[in-house]
Amino acid sequence: MSTEEIIAAFAISTVGFSFFLFGKKQQRLPQLVVGMLMMTAPFVVRDPLVVSITAIALLIGMRVAIRFES
């Protein structure tokens, strides 16, 4: 793994873990699911740019899901 892959994977997984914990504690399904997906995305996709774009798409999808949930 290159340095860029490690840094991107760590950053995105850390944010995903935070969303996962928040969703679990507050019983919020969108945050829980997006957190799990963000934690596993770096294992599936190796390219840092693609992982970053995937994470941004997941965050936008979560925002839309929260907006329509209310």
Image (cartoon, rainbow, N blue to C red):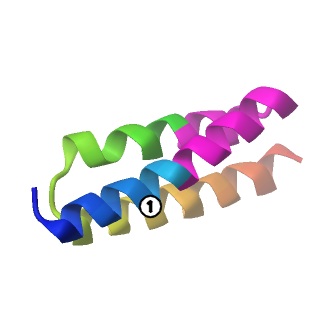
Is 26 displayed left or right of 1 in the figure? right
Q: Secondary structure at mark 1?
A: helix
x, y percent for residue 41: 33, 45
Residue farthest front in this picture: 3
The quadrant of the rendering that contains the N terminus is bottom left
Give the residue type at disc 1. Answer: Ala
Mark 1, residues whose alpha carbon is within 10 Å: few (<14), some, or many (≥20)? some
Residue 63's quadrant in the figure? bottom right
Q: Which residues are magenta?
A: 15-35
Is 20 displayed left or right of 9 in the figure? right
User: What secondary structure prevails in the magenta region?
Assistant: helix
Is 9 displayed left or right of 55 in the figure? left
As for residue 55 lying within the magenta part, the answer is: no
Instruction: Name the one closer to the observer, 10 or 19.
Output: 10
Instruction: Name the one closer to the observer, 65 or 28.
Output: 28
Residue farthest right in this picture: 70
Q: Is residue 27 visible?
A: no
Give the answer, above or below, for where 60 lies relative to 37.
below
Give me the residue at 65% from left, 46% from top: 18
x, y percent for residue 59: 56, 60
Is 27 displayed left or right of 12 in the figure? right
Residue 2's quadrant in the figure? bottom left
**Residue wearing tag 1:** 11
Give me the residue at 57% from left, 34% from top: 33
As for residue 31 lying within the magenta part, the answer is: yes
Q: Is residue 38 visible?
A: yes
Give me the residue at 21% from left, 41% from top: 44
Residue 25's quadrant in the figure? top right
Give the answer, above or below, for where 2 lies relative to 46.
below
Residue farthest left in this picture: 1
